[in-house]
Amino acid sequence: MSVSPIRSEAVRKYFTETPIKPEQPDNSGNQNQMITGGVLLFVALFLFVSGNGLLVLLGMAAGYFGFRSLSKGYSESSEKKTSYEQACARYQNDYAKAEPKPSDEQMDRWMSSDIENIIKESLKRLGLEHDDYKANPFLLGGPAELQETQLAVGRDGKIRYSHLNILIVFLTEHNIASYQCTHNLIYGQTLDDNTQEFPYKEITNLQIKTINKKISIVNGRREFANGVQQFALYTTGANVIEVVYSFSQSADLNGELVKVGSEDTIAAIRKKLEEYKKKYGR
């Protein structure tokens, strides 16, 4: 599925850091230097005109220091002006790449729309066309572990990511069917996906653990985020389904991660496994 260039540009801006406007340089010191230099040159001219040998010598010294002060003040002031103009040009260019940003609400609407399309694709890929499955998908997701994943903290204080790892689970009578994909929110595209299906009897462990992961942040650095919550499901065949879905209270990043799905997914899977074990004794 492709989205409009307007949306792609807006989402890209949302995840682009807004530059800080450069401050106008303080040239007061350089202006004082030029005034001092001008005064000394005027004094030097006056002393030269006097014709007195000693005064002429003093005039030469005054002229030297006056010219030096004037030249230095003018040169430094010109450099500051040029540097400021270049900084302003960069700022205007970078600002146009980052602003105006879409609202947090608009970002969430786009994400919800993408997830609806992903659910439709998962039903097709898993061959689950029954209405019971369509009405009851379980979702869980979080930031994708990609170099290009970017982070932005919205005006609402919530953390959003440009690339998502999304897990969709369907609980059938005897099997758990899953569809997992990496989704690019900027272009509304699924970058890669896979499906898995396991009988409940082959599931050996459901685990929620707190781990440290490298997460890309908005300015391109990748740093460890302590306290990332990860859901993992293990089977007898050494298969595993896992997805990062939340930050714990000890996480380094300040703010609440915008949730993809809910923790009800974990509770539903756990409940289904318990029901199966009681019913079939496995």
Image (tube, rainbow, N blue to C red):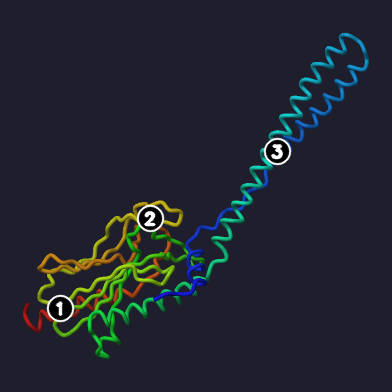
Label 2 secondary element: loop
Going from the N terminus, do you reach mark 1 or mark 3 first? 3
Q: Which mark is residue 252?
A: 2
Q: Which residue is mark 1?
A: 274
> Which residue sits at x=23%, y=85%?
128
Q: In the displayed structure, does residue 45 sit left or right of residue 74? A: right
Label 1 secondary element: helix
Query: Residue 3 at what x, y percent from top left?
Result: 45, 74
Q: Residues within 10 Å of mark 1 (few under 14, many from 20)?
A: some
Query: Residue 123 at what x, y percent from top left?
Result: 27, 82
Label 3 secondary element: helix
The front one of 248 and 143 is: 143
Q: Amino acid at mark 2?
A: Asp
Position of the N terminus, as image quadrant, is bottom left
Q: Which residue is mark 3?
A: 78
Is the C-beta separation of discs 1 and 3 under 8 Å? no
Is the C-beta separation of discs 2 and 1 under 8 Å? no
Marks 2 and 3, Cα distance to the nearest angstrom? 44 Å
Query: Residue 7 at what x, y percent from top left?
Result: 49, 72
Q: In the displayed structure, does residue 167 sit left or right of residue 101? A: left
The front one of 48 and 171 is: 48
- Whether 137 is drawn above or below 235: the answer is below
Q: Amino acid at mark 3?
A: Ser
Q: Residues within 10 Å of mark 2 (few under 14, many from 20)?
A: some
Residue projecting furthest to the bottom: 131
Q: Which mark is residue 52?
A: none
Position of the C terminus, as image quadrant, is bottom left
